[in-house]
């Protein structure tokens, strides 16, 4: 239950989503507080910014409450942000997350 509480608080903080659905929590739950704590500061900032921006953009596209699809869009963007970190500069946690990630990365933003 503490992990679900952390997930709920984190989504509320990042996405201004006060009452995420159980489905949203289930989709976001594999990404944990420990994952963030064990990343470098640069990785953490990049992942959180990418997740927030993509999830909010997806939610804005359909309007209404946050959905599991919005969270998946955020997770794909977070993966792309981690992949953008040069391989020799990635933390062990980032390497493990990329190896274990089941979602396909989002296309990197065009310059």
Image (spheres, rainbow, N blue to C red):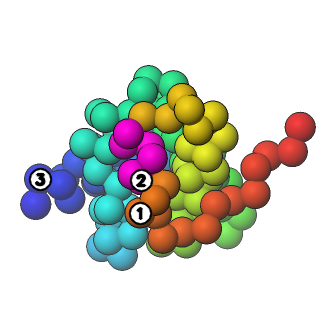
| Closer to us: 90 or 107 | 90
Task: Tell me, yes or no, if residue 84 can be seen here.
Answer: yes
Magenta portion: prevailing SS class: helix
Pinpoint residue 36: horizontal percent, then vertical percent: 35, 38
Pinpoint residue 95: horizontal percent, then vertical percent: 45, 47
Q: Residue at x 54, y 29 (%)?
A: 89
Q: Residues within 10 Å of mark 1 (few under 14, many from 20)?
A: few
Asked if residue 42 is positioned above or below residue 60 in the image, the reply reads: above
Marks 1 and 2, how far apart in space? 5 Å
Disc 2 target residue: 97
- In magenta segment, residue 52: no
Asked if residue 38 is positioned above or below residue 8 in the image, the reply reads: above
Contact check, label 1 and label 2, Cβ < 8 Å: yes
| Closer to us: 93 or 24 | 93
Secondary structure of the residue carrying tag 1 is: helix
Q: Quadrant of the N terminus?
A: bottom left
Mark earlier in primary sequence (1, 3)? 3
Mark earlier in primary sequence (3, 2)? 3
Furthest toward the top, the residue is 41
| Closer to us: 61 or 89 | 89
Asked if residue 52 is positioned above or below residue 91 in the image, the reply reads: below
Comparing marks 3 and 2, which lies closer to the viewer?
2
Disc 3 target residue: 2
Secondary structure of the residue carrying tag 3 is: helix
**Residue 33: quadrant of the picture:** top left
Disc 1 target residue: 100
Q: Residue at x 56, y 32 (%)?
A: 88
Q: Quadrant of the C terminus?
A: top right
Secondary structure of the residue carrying tag 2 is: helix
Q: Is residue 31 left or right of residue 72?
A: left
């Amino acid at each position: 239950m503490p992990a679900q509480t952390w997930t709920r608080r984190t989504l509320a903080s990042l996405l201004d989503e006060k009452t995420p659905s159980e489905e949203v929590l289930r989709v976001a739950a594999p990404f944990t507080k420990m994952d963030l704590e064990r990343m470098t500061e640069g990785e953490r900032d990049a992942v959180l910014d990418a997740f927030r921006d993509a999830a909010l953009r997806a939610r804005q596209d359909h309007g209404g409450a946050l959905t599991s699809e919005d969270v998946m869009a955020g997770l794909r963007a977070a993966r792309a942000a981690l992949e953008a970190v040069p391989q020799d500069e990635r933390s062990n946690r980032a390497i493990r997350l990329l190896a274990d990630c089941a979602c396909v990365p989002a296309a990197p933003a065009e310059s």
